[in-house]
Image: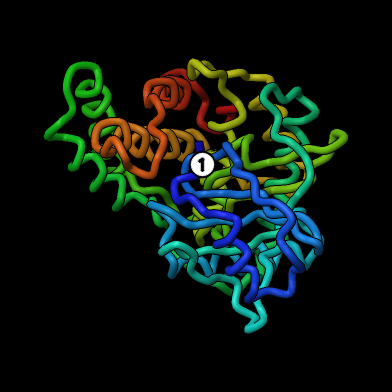
Amino acid sequence: MAVFTPVSEAEARLYLQAYDLGELLSLTPIAEGVENTNYRLETTAGRFVLTLFEYRTRADALPFCLGLTAHLAGRGYPAPRPMPDRERAWTGYLNGRPAAIIEWREGDWLRTPDLDDQRTAGRALAGLHLTSADYGGQRINPVGPAVWRELAERCAPVAEGEDRHRLERLEQELADMARRPLEALPEGPIHGDYFPDNVLFLNGEISGVIDFYFACIDTLAYDLAIALNAWGFDASGRADPAALAAFLAGYESVRPLSRAERAALPDLGARAVVRFSLTRLHDRLLAAPDALVTAKDPAPFLRRLDYWRAADRPVAAAV
């Protein structure tokens, strides 16, 4: 459920007074997502998403995130435009939370994408990287390696049983990564959370790429590695080589990887596994019962590490 901060129609109507978006017709909770509160907002001017930002999305990050989506949308990329209020501001406050009204994008995310869908999604990610290359905003990755270490340290006092074994493996990965840092690779704006539920399809084409709230400046191939982990494995964490190959082929049909980027993919894939496994383990172990986050089992994501760290996997042909 993705409604953590309730909003009444009267409160939404009052908030809308700052916008030129017509009169409220309906306000419907959206039960998708795990980070923020979302409502479908119908007005006499159209359909929008009302988002209240919770937990991991800091208010000072919103100018970068919303600015990036506006930049992409302005260049024809299927990202949702943030709606400015009468003062040209993209954000305000509603019920004590930073809030924004964002363009509604039609379509649905795919539970079982086929290989054509994988290629289409790969092309769209590469298009995002190329289209955003001249975006001038700056944001350090909010869930980068320094945060991974902090998450592991917080988990250590409370991890028991299988969670203790998972944490030990993740701690070993962190130690190994510290001993062999990556060489510099091309950087730019990344989505940071390019999972299937953030990519909307309509009639076989991508109609919307949404939820840019982990977006930042980071290694482009790392964003690709996150996406490969998201699109190329089944629910148990088992690799689907055909899906991985299709997604990568789609990506490289738009933005071919350099030799260094391709060689780094297994290590970047492993780093993405560490990032998402640690946040899931942390939320599972330490989130309070009323915390504004839906905990996910870290085990299936951690299993992806076996694929990326396979001893007999050629570094340059990992996917």
Q: In this view, does 141 lie to the left or right of 110?
A: left
Percent across and percent down for residue 103 are 72, 58
Label 1 Cα neighbours within 10 Å, binned few <14 / some 14-19 / many ≥20: some
Q: In which quarter of the image is residue 60?
A: bottom left
Q: In this orientation, which residue lies closer to the viewer: 50 or 133? A: 50
Judge whether 28 appears above or below 197 on screen.
below
Q: Is mark 1 on a helix, strand or loop?
A: loop
- Quarter of the figure with residue 17: bottom right
Between 128 and 214, the residue placed more toward the observer is: 214
Report if residue 24 is visible in the image: yes
Q: How many labels does the image show?
A: 1
Q: Can residue 79 be seen in this view?
A: no
Q: Which of 82 and 148 is in front in this view?
A: 82
At horizontal 78% and vertical 38% (from top left) the residue drawn is 201
107 over 229 or under it: above or below: below
Report x, y in % for residue 73: 75, 62
Indicate left or right for 202 with 122 as reference: right
| Left or right for 225, reference 114 | left
Check disc 1 and give the amino acid type.
Ala
Report the front residue among 89 and 26.
26
Question: Badge 1 is on which residue?
Answer: 2
- Whether 269 is drawn above or below 216: the answer is above
Name of the residue lying farthest toward the right: 203
> Relative to 70, is 126 above or below?
above
> Is residue 105 rendered to the left or right of residue 17?
right
Residue 219, x across and y down, in percent = 51, 54
